[in-house]
Amino acid sequence: MQTKILLDEDQMPKAWYNILADLPTPLDPPLHPGTGKPLVPEDLAQIFPMELIMQEMSPKRMIDIPSEVQDVLRLWRPSPLYRAHRLEKQLKTPAHIYYKYEGVSPPGSHKPNTAVPQAYYNMKAGIERIATETGAGQWGSALAFATQLFGLECTVYMVRASYTQKPYRKSMMQVWGAECIPSPSTRTKSGSAVLQKDPETPGSLGIAISEAVEDAATHSNTNYSLGSVLNHVCLHQTVTGLESKEQLATVDEYPDVVIGCLGGGSNFAGISFPFAGDKLKGTHRDTDIIAVEPASCPKLTKGVYTYDYGDVAGLTPLLKMFTLGHDFIPPSIHAGGLRYHGASPIDSKLIHDGIMRAVSYHQSEVFDAAQTFARTEGIIIAPETSHAAKAAIDEALKCKKSGEAKTILFNCSGHGHFDMSAFDAYYAKQLVDYEYPEKLIRESLARLPKIPGA
């Protein structure tokens, strides 16, 4: 009874899968925040290296992974795929549950899959420093790790709520040589403006993005780096799904259900896009692909599909996506990486078009699932990942009721070793199941930018 399915290093993907090549209709183009016109590559050159800009817009189905990037990825890739035998037994389900474990990377999550190539391309472009934002700290620590390997400086604006809740993520960044600043801060005009309105704000990813973009745009030696949402970030994450497909094939399985949590959308894209591509091409039309979000930040289930800024200050391009409004500030839930008002344009389009679907859960539900997972599979998973585990458990219980032996795959996107204060709150029964008032969501959506003709 095989538990771990492993690939050799030489079986690691040599190219990323670009789902843009297989979309039936193209994405709506990103728009310039000043003119409202479709972006051209030169519009992004102030904050991104040209290689990443070209990947953002590439029509190629497969894009080669540079050998220098492959050399770093081999530190932990290919990552293991596990069959959750003990969880299946606990649930008394006929389903086969598999999880792709990305917690084996040095920073402990899926984030280095894109941090490494982004640092590499910036280094090749002659950039000296990268500025970025981070929610729960997984992305900030991953970029700190990657920039250190390629000789770059790194400045991270960390959402204040998570900066307080997760101090050891900040410590990780500092060990790898990065500067970590609680956001909003007085370092930038956009941060100062937010603090002037609300000195006690918990912050948000939208605010932190504004600060990082402003930092990059005002320093000639600095570029901006984003850990989710954008097309090239989702592209880099597809190593996860590509490996999973090959690993499942060795045991003659193909998933009936594919699951990932969704904040900005990169880890969900990473596990799902290779399987969504099969669905789009008609080879596996019935695969159920599920994005899982927190009920306190329900952009997929209660937001709208329209153009919006990726940040609070309106410095980023306008993206066609599911959004709650760019100035929406979610409650301070422990899954800080899922506290983002919008979602990847590709994920959003696929969900809008019915290729994928979305569900939402409350905090207490996902920590129940995390405890069940830890007490069967032994791994303490991050609050973000716990959303995916909850959905996998729910799907397995449906199989128990129906008698179907479905194959369920979910992305176990990171460990929770730096999230123990969240588990302390869970055991002290201090978790709050935030239900964001519909009135406030409507007010936030009413402030969406008006784009003529869009």
Image: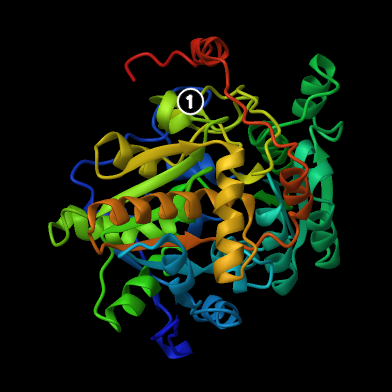
Residue 31: in sight, yes or no? no
- Residue shown at the point (86%, 21%) measured from the top left: 199
Rendered image quadrant of residue 31: top left
**Horizontal and vertical percent position of residue 423:** 73, 51
**Horizontal and vertical percent position of residue 78:** 48, 79
Residue 335: in sight, yes or no? yes
Q: Is residue 83 above or below residue 50?
A: below
Residue 422 left/right relative to 175: left
Q: Is residue 84 above or below residue 290?
A: below
Graded by Cα atoms within 10 Å as few (under 14), some (14 to 19) or many (20 or more), the crowding at tag 1 reads many
User: Residue most toward the left?
Assistant: 282
Quadrant in which the C terminus appears: top left
Q: Which residue is mark 1?
A: 308
- Residue shown at the point (14%, 62%) measured from the top left: 283
Residue toward you, 46 or 320: 320
Residue 320 left/right relative to 418: left
**Horizontal and vertical percent position of residue 405:** 25, 64
The residue tagged with tag 1: helix, strand or loop? strand
Quadrant in which the N terminus appears: bottom left
Residue toward you, 101 or 225: 101
Count of numbered badges drawn on the protein = 1
Q: Is residue 198 above or below residue 218?
A: above
